[in-house]
Amino acid sequence: MGKIYTPKELLSVLIGFDTTSFRSNRDMIDFIVDYLSSHGISSSLGFNEEETKADLVATIGPQVAGGIILSGHTDVVPVAGQDWNTDPFVAQEKGDKIFGRGSCDMKGFIAVVLAMIPEILKFNLKVPLHLAFSYDEEVGCLGAPALISRILKDIAPPSAAIIGEPTGMKLVNAHKGGTMFETTITGCAGHASQTQNGVNAISLAGRCISFLDKKAEEFKIKGPRDDRMEPPYNTISIGTIEGGTAHNIIAGSCKLVWGCRSIAKEDAISLMDEFINYCNREIIPPFKKISTDTEILTTEINGIPPLMARESNPAEELVLQLTGKNEILGVAFGTEAGLFDDAGIPSVVFGPGHIDQAHKPDEFVAISQLEECSLFIQKMAKWSAEQ
């Protein structure tokens, strides 16, 4: 007989694994593998190139088509520089809250799903429930593509996916995508007293930023909108800027990392094309006369597709049926749901906790949210047995 945990107890165990994205998640995955095995459930693992990180796929019920994926990421964001009142990797229960890094985003969901397995196994499932736990979500959903590829290759075609990111147990069927770009600017270094003979790459970066700021203002006025999201329009953010070597040297190089959160997938790509054309047409030509090496190169370094509302979505229909709710939300933050949906697996976001608590010091999840999620998983098992 396998180990029995309450969701609170299991969450405490999972918080204890420091799975910050720059660290390995193997200890946490090994724990989950052993736990599942103790309940007679086998796991399939996939690894990153260094084999320091693993994802996990496991099936509860028959190996037939039409299963429901319950998915979550195992990594968490860093705690460095944050003022915590408790040890972030030791769960602390205070009142109706459990504090700890990942409690909300999103080990709470994983803990509930795992803790409910003994209850799930009491039912004779007709529709399989597939567990899918990823790595490197917090650094750009880097692990999910390989996980999804394994799912499509190794298991009978699923009908839907529920990604348990914190939504306050409210159904989300749309979220923004996130695309990150790197712009490398090459100028011409020289003595700061001879600016007429050099091309200051930082100054060119300023022109690039001015263009992006103008486009951000345009997005507020025109373009796609989803008033369920906050804000309800596409946004642009300059993440980092690096350039120059000394105050008395004309900066010969500069690099920007910037991103676009877009409601429609094509908007970010159109923005990049427009930005590149503007740089080549309006910024660079006058400076080529000073130095033919002057250039501005922009590449996409990471992209998460948006989750777009479908006319017919089995995942959405199932959540509404089991919860008896009819409210459907859209959110501005990105998740792996966009990747699952893009791969042809209809997806929604639905899980315990609130995004307002994520990524902050003293992150927490309300115990009432864990309880509500537990009831949902129980209803799903009962639904599966009745199909």
Image: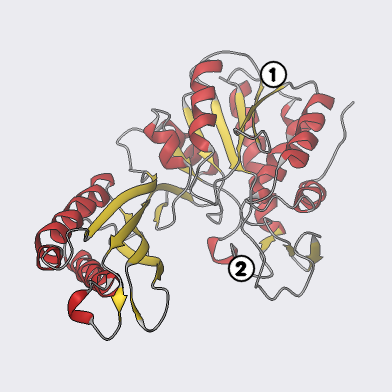
Residue where numbered disc 1 is placed: 124
Specify the amino acid type for callout 2.
Answer: Lys
Question: Closest to the observer: 310 or 30?
Answer: 30
Residue 232 seen in render: no
When the figure is inspected, residue 246 is found, relative to residue 97, above or below; the finding is: below
Tell me if 175 is positioned left or right of 190 in this view.
right
Tell me if 308 is positioned left or right of 157 in this view.
left
Task: Measuring from the top left, give residue 32's x and y in whole percent.
Answer: 76, 35
Quarter-wise, where is residue 36 in the image?
top right
- Which residue is painted at 66% across and 38% down in the image? 53
Tell me if 44 is positioned left or right of 39 in this view.
left
Residue where numbered disc 2 is placed: 360
- Which residue is painted at 60% across and 21% down in the image? 128
Front of the two marks 2 and 1: 2
Residue 323 seen in render: yes
Give the quarter of the figure containing the C terminus: top right
